[in-house]
Image (cartoon, grey):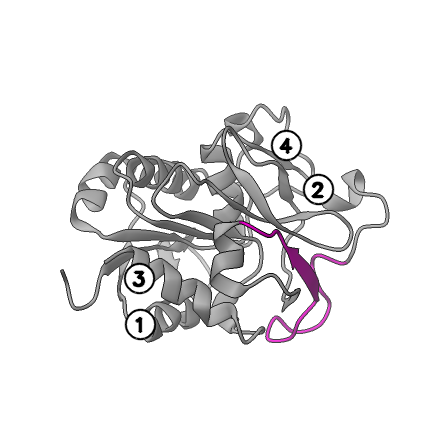
Amino acid sequence: MRARPIIGVTLDSEPAGGWSKLPWYALRQNYFSAVVAAGGLPVALPHEPALAAAYMAELDGLLVTGGAFDVDPALWGGGAPHPKVTLKPGRTDFEMAAVRAALAADKPVLGICGGQQLLAVAFGGTLIQHIPDAVAGALAHEQPNPRTEPGHEVAIAPGTLLARIVGTAPMRVNSAHHQAVATAGDGALVNAVAPDGVVEGVEHPGHRFALGVQWHPEYAVDPRDPAIFSAFVEACR
C-alpha cells in the first residue's frame, strides 16, 4: 500500500491568448490542496485520450474537475447544443476516456460539478442542457454571491454512499452550473437534490467508488465537504 495514493486530476485548458500566446492548461489550487489534505498525492493529467488507459494503470484514483464548459450533447443523445452550451472537445474526449478506463479497472472516481455530469453520461445517463429553460421556478444555480459562500441547500438521499460519507442532514453548498443531470444512467443512483428538484449528485453502487457531486467540495463551504475527499482518497488505498 502506498503512503499516499496517486490521484490523477484532470486539467482545464484554454486556447492561445490571455495568459499565454500558446494553448495552456490551468486549474485552481484548491483541487490539489484538498487531495493533499485528504492524504492523496495529486498529479495533473494532460489531455491525451490515447493515453487514458496507460494513465489509469499507474494511478490509484481519478478526480474529474469542473470548469466553465459543458459535456457535448452528442455523447448522450441530446441533439443540437443549446445556445448557452460551451464545448471543449479535447478536454471532454480525454476525460470520458479516462473515466471509462477507471471504471473498467474498478478504480475510484470522484466527479465534481461538470465532472459529475460527465460521470453520469459515462453511466449512460442524460443531462438538462440549460436549467432555466427546463425547470420551472429553478433556483439560481449560477449563484450571484462568491463561490466561497453557500448558494443553497441539498438533501442527501438515505442509504447512499454519499449519505454514509456525510450523513443525511441537508448540506449547504455552492453552485456554479447551468446544466444538470436529468437521468443518472443504468444502475446509477441520484444521491442529492436541490430544493427545486435539480439533481446534485450521482453514484453507482456497481463500482468500487464512483461518486459525483454538483457542488465544489474543494471550497469546504459545508464543514462536511472535506469528508468527501477523505472517503475518496481512502477508497484509493
Q: Main secondary structure of the magenta part?
A: loop
Residue stretch rendered in magenta on the structure: 140-159
**What residue lies at 27% left-to-right and 56% top-to-bottom?**
236
Cα–Cα gap, marks 4 and 3: 38 Å
Q: Are marks 4 and 1 in contact (CB under 8 Å)?
A: no
Q: Which residue is mark 3?
A: 234
Cα–Cα gap, marks 3 and 1: 12 Å
In front: 120, or 76?
120
Q: Say which of marks 4 and 1 sits in front.
A: 1
Label 3: state its secondary structure: helix
Cα–Cα gap, marks 4 and 1: 37 Å
Q: Which residue is mark 1?
A: 36
Q: Alpha-carbon neighbours of circle 3 within 10 Å: few (<14), some, or many (≥20)?
A: some
Q: Is residue 112 left or right of residue 129?
A: left
Q: Amino acid at mark 4?
A: Pro
Q: Amino acid at mark 1?
A: Val
Residue 141 on the magenta segment: yes
Q: Say which of marks 1 and 2 sits in front.
A: 1
Residue 129 on the magenta segment: no
Question: Which of the labelled discs sits on residue 81, or is there none?
Answer: 4
Q: Quadrant of residue 31?
A: bottom left
Q: Is residue 52 left or right of residue 202?
A: left
Give the x, y percent position of residue 34.
39, 71
